[in-house]
Amino acid sequence: MSVRKLRCFECGHGYGYVGDDSHPARCPACHSSLVPPSGSLAVFDRSSWESANGLAKLRISAVDELGRLFEFGVAARGETGKLVELRIDDAPVDPRVIRTVVRIPPTVEAELAEAGLTVEPTSSGHPRRPSTSD
Ligand SMILES: [Zn+2]
């Protein structure tokens, strides 16, 4: 049994989910479905393109266990990738929230690594914490 800490991308409400199953993808405070992926995230598409100024962009599309569509927009400069856009079921997540709250899931990070990119660490303190039960 594990407790997961989730944070709503819409209203910022933090809440915990107890259990190992996929969590209901809905914020208990504002009922938004702009919440982190439920269960494992399966990547099914990756596209990239490069603009004239040398700034490459990648779009990684994935679905979670509830069938919600996650589209991660990553800007790459050199070998560093930075998450700049996130759409969940076609609803855009606020860029400020993307900068401070959203963490790139391991499956997406693996896709970026395959494309030769490392993820830029976030500046402010949101350390990646292993989920532990106590
Ligand atoms: Zn909320």
Image: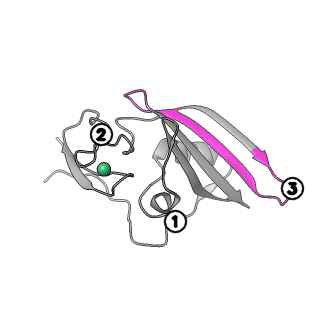
The quadrant of the picture occupied by the N terminus is top left
Per the image, the residue denoted by label 1 is 121
Q: Tell me which amino acid carries mark 2.
A: Arg
Magenta segment includes 97: no
Q: Distance between the residues labelled 1 and 2?
A: 27 Å
Give amino acid for label 1.
Pro
Sooner in the amino-acid sequence: mark 2 or mark 3? 2
Indicate if the residue with disc 2 has its beta carbon within 8 Å of ligand 1. no
Residue at the (44%, 35%) spot, across then down:
41
Task: List x then y, in percent, for residue 14.
Answer: 26, 56
Q: Residue 109: x percent and y percent?
A: 54, 48
Q: Quadrant of residue 110?
A: top right
At label 3, counting other C-alpha atoms closer than 10 Å, the crowd grade (few under 14, some 14-19, many 20 or more) is: few
Kindly identify the residue that appears in the image at 56 percent across and 45 percent down: 72
Between 95 and 64, the one lying in front of the other is 95
Marks 1 and 3 close (CB-CB < 8 Å): no
Per the image, the residue denoted by label 2 is 26
Q: Nearer the viewer, residue 106 or 103?
A: 103
Residue 81 on image: x %, y %: 63, 57
- In front of the other: 80 or 95: 95
